Amino acid sequence: MNAQEQMGFVSELMANVTEEIIKEIIDGKIPENWDGIELRQLIADTCRYNAYPMSRSRKRAYNNTVIVNDL
């Protein structure tokens, strides 16, 4: 995947996550007393839910790249 395709993928995925959470807010599912702490956790959980499992070798390579490139 080239850089342009990567940016498009990330933009589309994050737009879907944003749309999903905003719909939950509009539908009254999110408590009004939630501030940035709970909303950040909800965003993280939603992103984690949308992730696909990786094979061990691919996860190991991913973790290595994250460490080496300080991502």
Image (tube, helix red, strand yellow):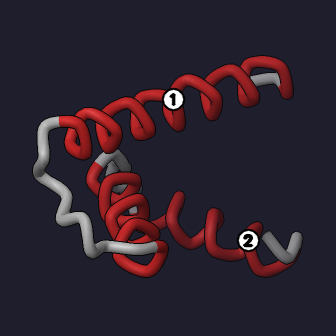
Name the quarter where the C terminus is drawn.
bottom right
Dot 2 crowding, Cα within 10 Å, few <14, some 14–19, many 20+: few
Residue topped by disc 1: 15
Q: Nearer the viewer, mark 1 or mark 2?
A: 1
Q: Residue at x 71, y 75 (%)?
A: 64
Element type at mark 2:
helix
Reply above or below: 51 against 17: below
Q: Nearer the viewer, residue 17 or 3?
A: 17
| Residue 70 x/y as whole percent | 85, 76
| Residue 27 x/y as whole percent | 13, 37
Residue topped by disc 2: 66
Label 1 vs 2, first from the N-terminus: 1
Q: Nearer the viewer, residue 54 or 36?
A: 36
Q: Quadrant of residue 41?
A: bottom left
Q: Which label was assigned to residue 43?
A: none
Q: Residue at x 32, y 54 (%)?
A: 46
Q: Residue at x 11, y 51 (%)?
A: 29
Is 8 positioned to the left or the right of 52 in the image? Answer: right
Q: Residue at x 34, y 38 (%)?
A: 22
Q: Quadrant of residue 65?
A: bottom right
Name the quarter where the N terminus is drawn.
top right
| Residue 63 x/y as whole percent | 63, 74
Is 41 positioned to the left or the right of 68 in the image? Answer: left
| Residue 12 x/y as whole percent | 55, 23
Reply above or below: 56 against 30: below
* Mark 2: amino acid: Val
Reply above or below: 52 against 58: above
Q: CA distance from mark 1 to mark 2?
A: 24 Å
Q: Nearer the viewer, residue 6 or 26?
A: 26
* Mark 1: amino acid: Ala
